[in-house]
Amino acid sequence: MIKRWMKNLKRAIIPNGLLGRFFLIILLPLVVVQFSLGLFFYNRHWETVSHRLARDIYGEIQLVTNVINTPNLSQEERNKLIKQAEHDLLLDLSWHPQAKMPLKQKRRLVDMSHDLVGEMKGLTFPYQITTSTDGQQRINIQLNNGILEVVVARKRFFTSTVWIFFLWMLLSSILWFGVALIFMKNQLRAIIRLAHAAEAFGIGKNVDYYKPEGATEVRHAGAAFLMMKNRLQRYLTERTAMLAGVSHDLRTPLTRLKLQLSMLPQDETTHAMDQDVTDMENMLNGYLTFARGDGREESKEIDLNPFMTNLVDKFKKTKHNIDLIIQNNVHVIARPSDLSRALGNLIANAGRYATYTWVKVKKQQDQVQIIIDDNGPGIPKNKRQDVFKPFVRLEESRNPATGGVGLGLTIARDILLSHGGDITLDASPQKGLRVVVTLPLYKHQK
């Protein structure tokens, strides 16, 4: 359970896409470094600045008190000195002659006041510090002839450099992260083009337009893909040429055998031998058709609505009982004649063993499903995979007129796999066989 929980947590946290993972790889260290650096700088900088600001205020207050407390200083001279100090030192000063400080006064300090209290300990006169509701520090200093009240504005205790630093750090991080994101997207474009080329080649499309690009590793992967593509195409070409030669070599002795059999007296033995030769020729033709593959026709966009309608109409002309249900605007990329041949084999098989066939075409997420149901005898569950093997027939009479040579489903599946699709068999709701063909939905239709 713990392992499953950790796996689900990992899926929830870690993005699936490569861009999202790059985003996480860059963003996570960036946030950790910026946070730790900012926290360290904030503590050190704030402590240093607070101490220096408090010391400056203490020095100014010490200077003013020493001057104000000068003996034999007239009231006019004292007021003049207070106004000069307010102008030069940016302090709010007021003189209360003959006033006495209360013996006890409740203190209410802010963070900066603690630094100021620490510095004010060096003052030689009694004093009291309080904080007003607007954050101002009010300091009452008992001098010989009265009380000097000093009001220090909140801005004297704070500096904007900390917030400027954090703002600069945040904006610069966003800027450089945006630049890194642009570069990452450019690098990922090469990987995406390679994936699209591999996907197109997998469904039989021409990918001669693809050229390796991007980082060294991506170029190596692209070059390996092109080498694989060229080897597969060369293999298919050589296989086709070899089978063409085999076809020519085998047809010659089969033709001689048929000619010799036609010159012999016709009886049951010669008739059986002639049937065997015909079966061998049909099997050879079927195998060559299967092995020759599809690779010559170009893939293109196909609207399945008119395509399937024309295909079904051909079977209806042969007295085949068949119904078609199809959604509108269903498109695939395929080779028309090969797809027609594969689907035609499947519908023909249904018509061979059943009295009625139902064909349904629908979208299923990013795929197209072509479902062919019939009311025939069906195929046992344990034999549904065997029928896709070459020359495997469930009809035991081996009569080509009733069961072919055992390559219909093999050829159909081979064609559908080359288009990036597949074919599966299941029990039909009509008590027969259900054939489900899946093909990639044309991307513009997703």
Image: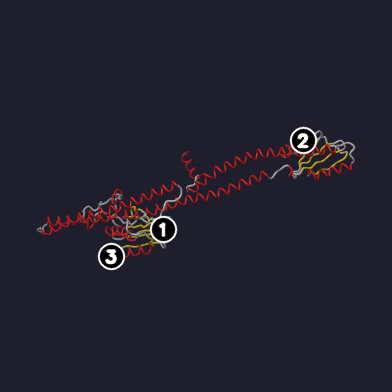
Residue farthest toward the bottom in the current orientation of the protein? 317
Residue 283 visible in the picture: no
Chain-order first, disc 3 or disc 2 = 2
Q: Secondary structure at mark 2?
A: helix
Query: Which residue is disc 3 drawn over?
Result: 319
Left or right, 49 with respect to 394, comes to: right
Quadrant holding the C terminus: bottom left
Residue 320 x %, y %: 29, 63
Chain-order first, disc 1 or disc 2 = 2
Numbered tag placed on residue 120 in the rendering = 2
Query: Which residue is disc 1 drawn over?
Result: 442
Quadrant of the image occupied by residue 284: bottom left
Identify which residue is drawn at 36% across, 49% down: 227
Q: CA distance from mark 3 to mark 2?
A: 111 Å
Q: CA distance from mark 1 to mark 2?
A: 80 Å
Q: Secondary structure at mark 1?
A: loop
Q: Nearer the viewer, residue 414 or 94?
A: 94
Q: As shown in the figure, which amino acid type bears the numbered disc 1?
A: Tyr
Q: CA distance from mark 1 to mark 3?
A: 33 Å
Residue 441 visible in the picture: yes
Sort mark 1 into few (<14), some (14-19) or many (20+) by Cα contacts within 10 Å.
Answer: some
The reply to whether dot 1 and dot 3 touch (C-beta < 8 Å) is no
Chain-order first, disc 1 or disc 3 = 3
Sort mark 3 into few (<14), some (14-19) or many (20+) by Cα contacts within 10 Å.
Answer: few
- Disc 1 versus disc 2: nearer the observer: 2
Q: As shown in the figure, which amino acid type bears the numbered disc 2?
A: Met
Q: As shown in the figure, which amino acid type bears the numbered disc 3?
A: Lys
Left or right, 249 with respect to 269, comes to: right
Q: Nearer the viewer, residue 428 or 38?
A: 38
Residue 37 x %, y %: 60, 40
- Disc 3 versus disc 2: nearer the observer: 2
